[in-house]
Image (cartoon, rainbow, N blue to C red):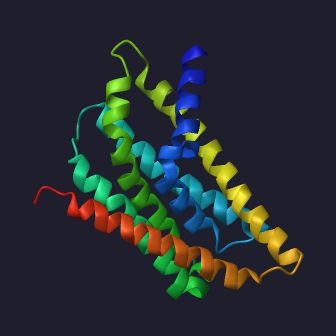
Amino acid sequence: MRDFIFYFKVGWAHILSSDATDHIYFITSLAIIYTFLDWKKVLVLVTAFTIGHAITLYLSALDLFRFNIEWVEFAIPCTIVVTAATNLFLRPELKTKGVLQYLMALVFGLVHGMGYANYIRMMLSKNQDLLWSLFSFNVGLEMGQILVVLLVLSMQWGLEKYKVIHARLLTRIVSSLILIVSMLLAIERYQALDL
């Protein structure tokens, strides 16, 4: 149980720490086009992201894959750029079909998992149960992501209920801001690449 609590806290901190802004931007981009009425769709989206994240962490912990961390750090904001841009240009299709967004969440979860893979590999000791530790980490991660989603949906509900801003306009503003910030981050990380 001690290992579960330890890795749960690591997963929770991974999404809610000040170093996890890219993760928060991504989850916010996924959730902002939905309302509380769509909570099942949002939960499936977040879980698809966690599954992708978990697959990469598992393969990395087994030392089956190694990633160039500089390219991964560049790819992460690119996933946010694509998600935010998709919100701006394909919002109606996403809300009705959703398959594209589920697939994006899964694939982009693989990419985000690569950013944490080296750290997790070093953290896991040889005598620990790999599956239990990764399960605990991902439960903590999922709970942290659900908290972010609840905050996003609550903000959206409150602002629309009190007629501060319409949900569609809020989606455009939030997605545009995240798009700009993530593009700047991607440019900065691209410039840091050793080409």
Name the residue furthest left. Answer: 195
Q: Residue 184, image x and y in percent?
A: 37, 69
Name the residue furthest right. Answer: 162
Q: Residue 152, image x and y in percent?
A: 70, 62
- Left or right for 66, reference 145: left
Residue at 47% of width from left, 74% of height from top?
A: 179
Residue at 82% of width from left, 77% of height from top?
A: 160
Quarter of the image that includes the N terminus? top right
- Residue 8, relative to residue 167: is it above or below? above
User: Would you identify the image quadrant in which residue 123 lies?
Assistant: top left
- Residue 91, relative to residue 32: is it above or below? below
- Left or right for 111, reference 151: left
User: Would you identify the image quadrant in which residue 180 lies?
Assistant: bottom left
Q: Residue 146, image x and y in percent?
A: 66, 50
Q: Residue 54, image x and y in percent?
A: 44, 43
Residue at 18% of width from left, 57% of height from top?
A: 193
User: Would you identify the image quadrant in which residue 59 lies?
Assistant: top left
Quarter of the image that includes the C terminus? bottom left
- Left or right for 147, reference 108: right
- Left or right for 189, reference 141: left
* Figure label count: 0
The foreground one among 79 and 93 is 79
Residue at 65% of width from left, 53% of height from top?
A: 148
Name the residue furthest top. Answer: 127
